Image (spheres, helix red, strand yellow):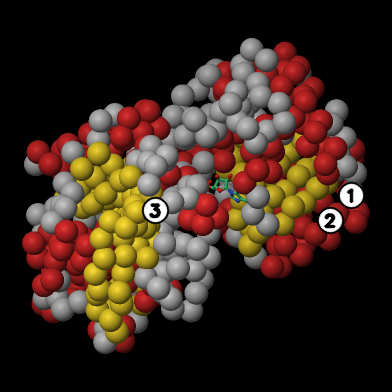
Amino acid sequence: MNVIHLSAECYPVAKVGGLGDVVGALPKYLCKAGVNASVVLPYYNRKFVQENSFDLEFKSSINVGKQVFDYQILKESKGQLGFDLFLIYIPRLLDRPEIYSYPDEIEQFIAFQICFLDWIVKSGNKPDIIHCHDHHTGLVPFLILHAYPFKSLANIATVCTIHNAEYQGCLGWDKIDLLPEFDRSKSDLLNWDTCINSLATSIKCSKKFTTVSPSYLEELSQKSSGLERLFKEQKQKGLGIINGIDTEVWDPEQDHLIYKNYSIETLIEGKEQNKKQLCEGFGLEPQKPLFIFIGRLVTEKGADLLAETINTSLETLKDQLNILVLGSGNPITEKELSKIKSKHSKHYGLHIGYNEELAHQMYAGADFLLMPSRVEPCGLNQLYALRYGTIPIVHKTGGLKDTVIDIENKEGYGLSFETLSIENIVHSIERAISLFANREKLVKTRKKMMALNFSWDKSSKEYIKLYENLLSG
Ligand code: ADP
């Protein structure tokens, strides 16, 4: 079975968040299970691309509106990622350092999708399944079915996975001429709320759509930034599959980015040494419980509540804890978080920016991970934390609800709260401090978490079942 994954992100080539992690791991685990999975990504002028070699696989040209673009398909030479990686290179359009946020982003991703389909048609290398990720690739299922140049692909099954429905790839109808000629009687499939909505189009036109957790699928019918009715209508086509983690990248026993490797057996000493090193770097006191937050500083993640939560905790709980934050995003939130430093320098650390290495060191060295997300399609941070023996504290929403069971339950291992409020987060921090003081229970909980299996070995099987059903039906 040949499956092509089409995405804007793929770790370690280009990652902003969970999308990158998933597309860098799922195809690898699919290949291990015997599926011929590959990834097609825009060419980014970034570290991985600069430092590795690529072979020219194909070249041709496409039209995007009135413009003609030459393009090349480049294949990573060594097969070092565990799957074939193809980059679409379009000089001056797809050869830039950043992944998102260029003023001509719409043209970039339309060209990416057209190039991909053009290559498949002209090379005759048809996959059995095209798996699209998020709105950047959301027009592909429509173009396959209704654009005249790609009619020969109409029988290929398409799956789209929604990693985040907040971002929908909306464009005005004035951009319609950027698309290749298509059956205009099908224009309605592109439309949602008077715009061309790429995410809505992918849900309508793909054979099946998936979300990255079952609870998120349920929630989208209630709350999805305008797509609620669509999710209700299309419910029978939807399937929630919880993300896995790449246990080769996220493994405290092998992780070369952390200070001291450790296993379930050596967890006490291992975590202690990682914590000591981390605390030293930020001037924190290693004997106190260390709480961390890692992520995009946006309201979806509850980052707007962080500054007040941290101030309240550090003031009311006095010197009982340390908090360390890594992230970037909303400038107001960044400023508020920066201000705390002058008041609580001994118990608070902050790194504004994106830092993969520090993230690994924090999962390894911390005691508790805070995830006060308003919306969490799956959440990978809590899964990494579990594997590194760091206890997650989560708002019960989306994938957090599906993966973290409160310690009050017999089979529980994390801390969770129903309603998102500063009061409830602070209360959970108090519960965590009590747990930290109960050494025996703390170690037992950590061991239990580290033994859990959230690997892609498990979740990739569900995708295989889905592909097989599509091909047999
Ligand atoms: P998102 O909604 O951002 O995709 P996920 O929980 O699915 O959230 O995935 C977040 C991924 O991005 C994790 O691998 C996390 O460690 C990483 N990450 C987020 N922010 C940062 C940062 N500032 N520095 C390093 N890694 C980060």
User: Which quadrant of the structure image shows residue 402?
Assistant: top left
Position in image of residue 246 (x %, y %): 47, 34
Picture residue at 68% right of the left edge, 19% below the top:
267
> Mark 2 or mark 3: which is in front?
3
Position in image of residue 69 (x %, y %): 31, 77
Give the vertical position of 441 relative to 356 (above or below).
above
Position in image of residue 253 (x %, y %): 60, 23
Give the vertical position of 232 relative to 270 (above or below).
below
Q: Which mark is residue 344?
A: 1
Q: Quick one: 252 or 374, which is closer to the camera? A: 252
Q: Which mark is residue 54?
A: 3
Decide if residue 149 is on the left or right side of residue 243. left
Q: Are marks 1 and 2 in contact (CB under 8 Å)?
A: yes
Residue identifier under label 2? 340
User: Which quadrant of the structure image shows residue 470?
Assistant: top left
Picture residue at 37% right of the left edge, 70% below the top:
90
The amino acid type, in three-letter code, at marker 2 is Ile
Q: Quick one: 212 or 145, which is closer to the camera? A: 145
The numbered mark, 1 or 3, whose residue comes first in the sequence reads: 3
Decide if residue 257 is on the left or right side of residue 64. right
Q: Quick one: 170 or 112, which is closer to the camera? A: 112
